[in-house]
Image (cartoon, rainbow, N blue to C red):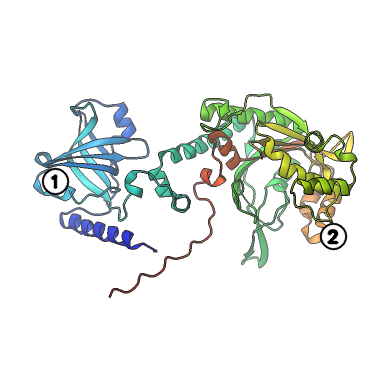
């Protein structure tokens, strides 16, 4: 445990208080404490003189000679307690002076109202439930160090009440999505997180070794291929809400471990999914935020009121790079893109340059919800081609606040086309082909629509947070360097 000299001194003081409390007969780490209710429930059911039992963390103490006012806080509210020498007796009142900010207490007493009108508990007995050996962050005035906030989220939750708002919203969102999908007849399933082949998306996987089987395994990058097997097996509407893992970069919108909702519906298509995501996300905004216009104060609000804009990939590129973009030579494309300060190696094809233009210059301009449709087939190997142009696929990418939120496909169910496209993607490496998935397709998969929704990014949209780390309780962080050893005392 790496502590600064300041932290070591605080800890020594609190250990001394712990010994004082033990000597006074208080166990420093108590057992279960039966409560009359949460602090919010006590406030809601307040009645003068009502006997109550309450518990919480001490967040403020104000000593006044033979009496002390303090605040307890639990996960619902904070409530004032009044500790008086005459009510407790000399020994219990003296022991209370060794209670520190951050300690957990259980109290018995009765409700009353102070002269200033504050609902309070007049304490008749108290017990120590847990001794805090470190002080609350910055004496309860807030925790500002971003690194500490992410590494020690428990301190962030204590010190910054607004943080709790974000994670409460996340919890309500997950509950809403499950309820809504179940009400629509979708069946929640679980598919393997450890997979023999990393499939379902183009991404670098995390590798591990399965000792019992003596083989290399992968953490899944997507559940898609297993969910499609269930369509083959006769499930018509399925979804999975869980973790995916991609061994790639960390930035404000990417974390290698992330939460996704993936949905498939037999006999549907991309348009089925487009209608569904519009209704799910707008419904979530109303359920979680109480409004369709979401975001933080000072930001341009995102208006999630349907219907949302629909624009083709090619039209967006033409709007930004010129109406004749797709008639230009590769050299002309490269020259224009480099003039926009994009990194364009000499070997890039026209399609690759185009996607770099879209990815780096266009997507970030799409703040309000936009369905980007008809993408080049080489970008999406698991989607069905457009009937009027086989170089394109019948898909959408839902972009909100300049980031992709949800891709949706008319799923490819032709096993021969699917094999050819996966072979092209594998570049001749047969070990990368999921032969069992291809065999499943050859047994017949119904036409279907499929979609994935990035839950972390959806929480960012609803709460207005700018970084994915602010919507994940425990984001990935590089190991911190240990503090230098203290110099020996002279």
Location of residue 21 by image quarter: bottom left
Judging depth in this view, the residue of 307 and 344 nearest the camera is 344
Q: Indicate the position of residue 159 as horizontal and vertical percent values.
A: 38, 44
* Residue drawn at point x = 67 percent, y = 48 percent: 222
Given residues 343 and 239, the one toward you in this image is 343
**Quadrant (top left/top right/bottom left/bottom right) for the C terminus:** bottom left
- Residue 175 image point, x, y percent: 53, 35
Q: Residue at x 20, y 25 (%)?
A: 48
Identify the secondary structure beneath mark 2.
Answer: loop
Q: Nearer the viewer, mark 2 or mark 1?
A: 1
Q: CA distance from mark 2 to mark 1?
A: 79 Å
- Residue 387 visible within the image: yes
On the rendered structure, is 444 left or right of 364? Answer: right
Hey, which residue is sitting farthest front in the picture?
Answer: 339
Q: Could you say where residue 100 lies in the image, as x and y percent from the top left?
A: 25, 50
Q: Is residue 441 visible?
A: no
Side (left or right) of 398 relative to 299 = right
Mark drawn on residue 244: none
Residue marked by disc 1: 93
Circle 2 is placed at which residue position? Answer: 428
Specify which label sits upstream in the sequence, 2 or 1: 1
When the figure is inspected, residue 101 is found, relative to residue 112, above or below; the finding is below
The mark total stands at 2
Q: Is residue 19 above or below residue 381?
A: below
- Callout 2: few (<14), some (14-19), or many (20+) C-alpha neighbours within 10 Å? few
When asked about the image quadrant of residue 73, the answer is top left
For residue 426, side relative to residue 192 (left or right): right
Which residue corresponds to the image point at 70% horizontal and 53% vertical from the top-left? 203
Q: Are marks 2 and 1 in contact (CB under 8 Å)?
A: no
Compared with 300, 161 (above or below) is below
Specify the quadrant that holds the N terminus.
Answer: bottom left
């Amino acid at each position: 445990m790496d502590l600064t000299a300041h932290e070591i001194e605080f800890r020594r003081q609190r250990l001394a208080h712990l010994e004082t409390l033990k000597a006074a007969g208080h166990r420093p780490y108590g057992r279960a404490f039966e409560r009359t209710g949460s602090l919010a429930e006590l406030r809601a059911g307040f009645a003068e003189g009502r006997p109550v039992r309450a518990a919480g963390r001490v967040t403020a103490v104000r000593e006044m000679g033979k009496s002390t006012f303090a605040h307890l806080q639990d996960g619902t509210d904070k409530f004032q307690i009044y500790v008086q020498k005459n009510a407790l007796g000399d020994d219990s009142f003296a022991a209370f002076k060794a209670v520190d900010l951050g300690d957990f207490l259980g109290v018995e007493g009765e409700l009353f109202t102070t002269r200033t009108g504050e609902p309070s508990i007049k304490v008749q007995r108290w017990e120590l439930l847990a001794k805090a050996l470190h002080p609350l962050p910055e004496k309860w005035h807030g925790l500002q160090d971003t690194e500490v906030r992410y590494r020690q989220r428990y301190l962030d939750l204590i010190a910054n009440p607004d943080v709790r708002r974000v994670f409460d919203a996340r919890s309500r969102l997950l509950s809403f999505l499950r309820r809504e999908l179940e009400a629509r007849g979708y069946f929640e399933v679980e598919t393997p997180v450890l997979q023999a082949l990393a499939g379902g998306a183009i991404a670098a996987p995390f590798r591990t070794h399965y000792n019992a089987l003596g083989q290399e395994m992968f953490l899944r990058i997507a559940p898609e291929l297993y969910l499609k097997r269930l369509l083959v097996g006769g499930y018509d509407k399925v979804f999975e809400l869980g973790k995916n893992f991609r061994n790639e970069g960390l930035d404000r919108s990417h974390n290698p471990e992330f939460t996704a909702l993936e949905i498939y519906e037999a006999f549907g298509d991309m348009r089925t999914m487009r209608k569904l995501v519009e209704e799910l996300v707008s419904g979530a905004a109303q359920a979680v935020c109480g409004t369709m216009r979401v975001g933080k104060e000072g930001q341009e609000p995102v208006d999630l009121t349907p219907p949302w804009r629909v624009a083709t990939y090619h039209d967006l590129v033409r709007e930004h790079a010129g109406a004749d973009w797709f008639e230009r030579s590769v050299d002309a494309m490269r020259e224009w893109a480099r003039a926009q300060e994009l990194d364009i190696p000499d070997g890039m094809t026209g399609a690759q340059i185009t996607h770099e233009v879209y990815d780096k210059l266009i997507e970030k301009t799409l703040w309000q919800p936009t369905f980007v449709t008809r993408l080049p087939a080489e970008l999406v190997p698991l989607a069905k081609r457009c009937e009027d142009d086989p170089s394109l696929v019948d898909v959408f990418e839902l972009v909100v606040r300049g980031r992709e939120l949800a891709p949706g496909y008319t799923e490819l169910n032709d096993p021969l086309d699917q094999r050819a496209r996966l072979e092209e993607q594998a570049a001749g490496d047969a070990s990368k082909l999921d032969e069992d998935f291809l065999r499943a397709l050859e047994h017949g998969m119904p036409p279907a629509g499929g979609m994935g929704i990035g839950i972390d990014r959806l929480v960012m949209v609803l709460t207005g947070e700018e970084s994915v780390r602010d919507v994940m309780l425990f984001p990935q962080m590089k190991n911190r360097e240990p503090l230098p050893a203290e110099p020996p005392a002279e």
